[in-house]
Image: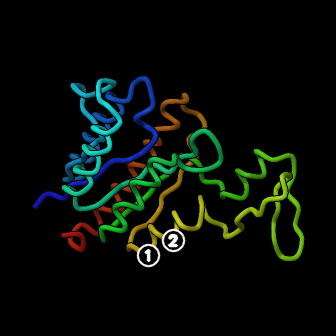
Amino acid sequence: MTIRIYLAGPDVFLRNALEIGERKKAMCMEYGFEGKFPFDASEHGKSSSTTIFQRNRDAMKSVNIGLFNLSPFRGANADVGTVFELGYMLAAGKRVFGYSSSASTYRTRVAKASNKLIEESNLVWDDDGLIVEDFNLVDNLMVCEGIMQSGGFIETMEEDGANQAERLAAFGGFRRCLQRISEIKDDLM
């Protein structure tokens, strides 16, 4: 039986999204997996929001596991749509895994976006007076704990040297994740 993997992430917003998807699907094949990217060339840019939602929901139902690109997107956090899909698959009882092109913690990324962080009463606050999660995780605790509690893991790898598209696609972390998943392949069937 071939393990089918849903490949979620902000990659779909890149100009070369179709190429990125094909590269990731080819990398999945190298490890004996079938990758399912959220769309194919015939659908790119031509579907309604309802159609996209239904197609992605159906794809998530049809796979064995999910592999989520958690690279920071338009801020300190992972892409909100990707996180929704992660939660959807987790609620469906599927094993989920993550990877990111940023190895820094969530707190570190928020600190970079804020003027300063304030530590007070065993809490960390940003310059807007909002609490910053400080659990030494790569993203929000619900994202990271959801992955780990499903039996999954998160791979991170700084990919600063690449161009924006390559960095967001996080090929290094993606490959590391596939390698680790291949090592537990028998547990996933």
Q: As drawn, is 144 to the left or to the right of 39? A: right
Q: Mark 1 points at which residue?
A: 149
- Local SS, label 1: helix
User: Between marks 1 and 2, how big is the CA–CA gap?
Assistant: 6 Å
Image quadrant occupied by the N terminus = bottom left
**Residue at the (73%, 55%) spot, across then down:** 108
In contact (CB < 8 Å): disc 1 and disc 2: yes
**Residue at the (83%, 76%) spot, across then down:** 122
Identify which amino acid the numbered label 2 is placed on: Glu
Residue 112, how many percent across, how many down? 77, 46
Q: In this view, does 185 lie above or below 20?
A: below
Question: In terms of depth relative to the viewer, which is nearer, 101 or 147?
Answer: 147
Disc tally is 2
Residue 149, how many percent across, how many down? 44, 75
Rendered image quadrant of residue 124: bottom right
Label 1 crowding class (10 Å Cα cut-off): few <14, some 14-19, many 20+?
few
Q: As drawn, is 64 to the left or to the right of 66? A: left
Residue 98, how many percent across, how many down? 44, 57
Residue 153, how many percent across, how many down? 44, 66
Disc number placed over residue 145 in the picture, else none: 2
Q: Is residue 92 above or below residue 20?
A: below
